[in-house]
């Protein structure tokens, strides 16, 4: 991805557009400039990915990658916010690129209309600092986890299960305590039998909230707030509005991130 020129100072138009968030102490001009310069990629453009894409474009993220090989289908329209009936059978990433440009014409959007594999993932993520895993299956989650660890990318991952959202932020390469996805969920035969939203079912508000949590983690990662998020994962029960945070350490026997 050829990135657009880094911003070192906001122009008048940008100051006005982002004035409500620049007012926040933790953000200010400097935080806004960071949002605009850090390259982020979304892998999986479904219920999570379309929400994340929308909110990051509004936040001011300009260098954004989108990876998904799917086409829009009728059953996507109950939760995937950037699509409508006219988009059915069109490439998801192309539709999203068109719609995000309407939100922020300054965006530099790079699309990857292909399935991620062990052969292409490193090349796809190499120019980004933050990777959002918005996929819906274990195979992709392991693949993205392993590539992010190896290439020192911040990984923000969410999973949806009916009314439950699971949210994870990984930076396992940074120190000897942060876990990776495999430390929490070691690969086993069990995972082969666990389904995705095609088999569990999902509604728009749960998918959207999952994507909002992920967008918020991008903000925190860029501003370097809440470093604990790399050591604990959030389980949010949307039916009862309960949340549980579970702390994790690196698994000394992890096949990917163990300290040797
Ligand atoms: Zn690990």
Image (tube, helix red, strand yellow):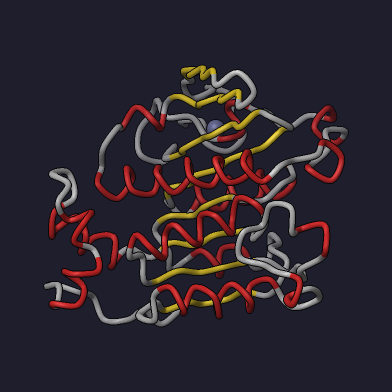
Q: Is residue 20 left or right of residue 161?
A: left
Q: Does 78 appear above or below 73?
A: above
Q: Quadrant of residue 86?
A: bottom right
Ligand 1 quarter of the rendering: top right
Which quadrant of the figure has residue 221?
top left
The residue lying toward the viewer, choosing from 97 and 111, is 97
**In this image, 119 relative to 156: left or right?**
right
Taking depth in this image into account, of 6 and 207 the one nearest to the observer is: 207
Residue 62 vs 77, above or below: the answer is below
Q: Position of residue 161 (x, y in %)?
A: 72, 33
Residue at x 50%, y 69% (from the top left corner): 65
> Residue sitting at 74 percent across and 46 percent down?
139
Q: Residue at x 62, y 59 (%)?
A: 81
Query: Outermost residue, front direction?
Result: 85
Residue 200, image x and y in percent?
Answer: 82, 36
Does residue 103 appear to the left or right of 220 in the view shown?
A: right
């Amino acid at each position: 991805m050829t990135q657009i020129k880094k911003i070192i100072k906001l122009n008048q138009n940008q100051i006005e557009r982002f004035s409500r968030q620049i007012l926040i102490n933790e953000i200010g001009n400097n935080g806004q400039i960071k949002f605009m310069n850090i390259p982020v990629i979304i892998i999986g453009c479904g219920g999570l990915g379309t929400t994340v894409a929308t909110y990051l474009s509004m936040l001011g993220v300009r260098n954004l990658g989108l990876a998904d090989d799917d086409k829009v289908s009728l059953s996507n329209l109950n939760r995937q916010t950037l699509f409508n009936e006219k988009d059915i059978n069109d490439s998801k990433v192309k539709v999203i690129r068109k719609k995000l440009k309407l939100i922020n014409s300054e965006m530099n959007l790079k699309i990857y209309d292909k399935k991620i594999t062990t052969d292409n993932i490193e090349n796809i993520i190499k120019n980004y600092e933050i990777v959002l895993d918005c996929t819906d299956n274990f195979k992709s989650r392991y693949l993205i986890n392993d590539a992010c660890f190896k290439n020192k990318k911040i990984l923000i991952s969410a999973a949806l299960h009916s009314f439950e959202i699971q949210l994870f932020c990984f930076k396992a390469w940074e120190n000897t305590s942060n876990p990776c996805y495999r430390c929490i969920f070691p690969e086993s035969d069990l995972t082969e039998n666990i389904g995705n939203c095609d088999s569990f079912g999902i509604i728009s508000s749960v998918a959207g909230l999952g994507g909002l949590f992920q967008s918020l983690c991008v903000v925190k990662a860029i501003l370097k707030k809440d470093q604990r998020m790399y050591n604990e994962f959030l389980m949010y029960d949307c039916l009862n509005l309960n949340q549980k945070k579970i702390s994790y350490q690196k698994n000394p026997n992890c096949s990917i991130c163990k300290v040797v």
